[in-house]
Image (cartoon, rainbow, N blue to C red):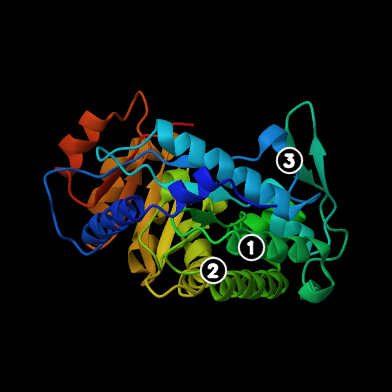
């Protein structure tokens, strides 16, 4: 499918590309410790296919319709006051994209409008590395990237599917059993964690080889956009393990995954993870934490406990307002997520 001339003009507009790159430089200053009085606000603009057109049915239609929608929204939400990060998101099976690569059955529940998966039936400790050349979901992912690139637009950011993190994927594949094995049969658990993380690194590396660095962003770029060259992991499940278990069995894997990017990257946190702050502080490639919901309430603990070169992306809430955050941080090492969607 082709883009309309009006959409193509908007999505290749040199002034908008320069504005995007100025915001990248401003975020880069935050990561580099350059303090300015104005804290960056992010309100990303997400292009979605018309009528929920399925990327599985036609990656070409998905790409074109997502970009048409993005161009129309940019005309309505545009300006200098915040980073209106222009993006599309390759949403394949929600948070179960990687599960499908390992052969888990993934299915959609129309009532809850969520993707789910069945646990693997294989024994923990026997996980096999998948052959992506024989995986239809990965083929769809590659086709979708190529469809996006063939439309030749330089402004939009391309959000990757949810690649998550090693512990998130392990819990998806095995449920709570993996947590028990980490305590009582660590060798078997560590085998599977290693296999999972190896695949996660490969997936990120493959996407990085396909997409321009200036347009590649990990998942949910409309809220978590970083300067080019930064990765991301989802740390939702880390609140389920103690600091010792995370340090000994998980943190090195998470750090290695972030190390697949030139500048390291971010961990997303949404629960009670503050007991892990000393471990987060020690992770060389962890450059930012993104906190929302319950995790946002611990902003002061993160700000005081993390390294001086670790940035905090905050999604404000009733109990942690922008004003509260400014009182705690003085505006330093802080990015505010002020979402449109």
Choose between 119 and 215: the one closer to the eye.
Answer: 215
Residue 274 appears left or right of 301: right
Q: Along the polypeptide, which appears first: circle 3 or circle 1?
A: 3
Q: Please give the residue where the numbered disc 1 appears in the rendered image.
A: 145
Q: Is residue 208 visible?
A: yes
Q: Along the polypeptide, which appears first: circle 1 or circle 2?
A: 1
Is residue 189 depicted above or below 276 in this figure?
below
Choose between 104 and 161: the one closer to the eye.
Answer: 161
Instruction: Report the residue that reaches farthest toward the right.
Output: 121
Q: Please state the horizontal and vertical placement of residue 25, each as a whole percent of the image.
A: 25, 60
Is residue 250 depicted above or below 162 in this figure?
below
Residue 229 appears left or right of 71: left
Quarter holding residue 262: bottom left
Contact check, label 1 and label 2, Cβ < 8 Å: yes
Q: Is residue 179 visible?
A: no
The residue at 69%/68% (across/down) is 189
Q: Along the polypeptide, which appears first: circle 2 or circle 3?
A: 3
Q: Please state the horizontal and vertical placement of residue 164, each as a whole percent of the image.
A: 59, 57
Q: Please give the residue where the numbered disc 3 appears in the rendered image.
A: 53
Q: Please give the residue where the numbered disc 2 appears in the rendered image.
A: 211
Choose between 274 and 151: the one closer to the eye.
Answer: 151
Residue count near mark 1 (Cα–Cα under 10 Å), binned few <14, some 14–19, many ≥20: some
């Amino acid at each position: 499918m082709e883009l309309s001339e009006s959409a193509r003009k908007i999505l290749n507009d040199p002034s908008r590309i320069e504005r995007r790159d100025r915001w990248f430089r401003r975020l880069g200053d935050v990561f580099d410790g350059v303090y300015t009085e104005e804290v960056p606000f992010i309100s990303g603009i997400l292009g979605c296919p018309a009528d929920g057109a399925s990327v599985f049915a036609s990656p070409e239609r998905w790409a074109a319709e997502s970009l048409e929608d993005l161009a129309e929204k940019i005309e309505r939400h545009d300006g200098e006051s915040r980073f209106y990060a222009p993006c599309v998101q390759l949403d394949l099976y929600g948070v179960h994209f990687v599960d499908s690569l390992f052969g888990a059955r993934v299915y959609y529940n129309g009532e809850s409008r969520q993707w789910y998966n069945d646990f693997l039936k294989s024994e923990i400790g026997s996980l096999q590395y998948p052959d992506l050349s024989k995986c239809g979901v990965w083929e769809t992912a590659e086709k979708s990237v190529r469809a996006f690139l063939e439309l030749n637009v330089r402004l939009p950011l391309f959000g990757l599917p949810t690649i998550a993190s090693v512990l998130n994927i392990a819990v998806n594949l095995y449920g709570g059993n993996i947590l028990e094995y980490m305590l009582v049969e660590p060798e078997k658990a560590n085998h599977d964690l290693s296999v999972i993380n190896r695949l996660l690194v490969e997936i990120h590396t493959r996407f990085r080889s396909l997409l321009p660095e200036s347009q590649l962003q990990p998942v949910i770029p409309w809220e978590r956009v970083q300067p080019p060259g930064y990765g991301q992991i989802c740390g939702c499940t880390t609140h389920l393990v103690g600091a010792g278990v995370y340090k000994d069995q998980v943190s090195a894997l998470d750090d290695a995954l972030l190390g697949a990017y030139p500048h390291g990257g971010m961990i997303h946190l949404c629960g009670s993870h503050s007991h892990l702050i000393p471990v987060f502080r020690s992770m060389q490639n962890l450059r930012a934490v993104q906190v929302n919901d319950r995790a946002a309430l611990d902003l002061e603990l993160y700000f005081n406990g993390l390294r001086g070169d670790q940035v905090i992306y905050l999604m404000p809430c009733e109990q942690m307002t922008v004003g509260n955050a400014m009182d705690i941080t003085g505006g330093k090492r802080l990015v505010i997520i002020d979402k449109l969607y």
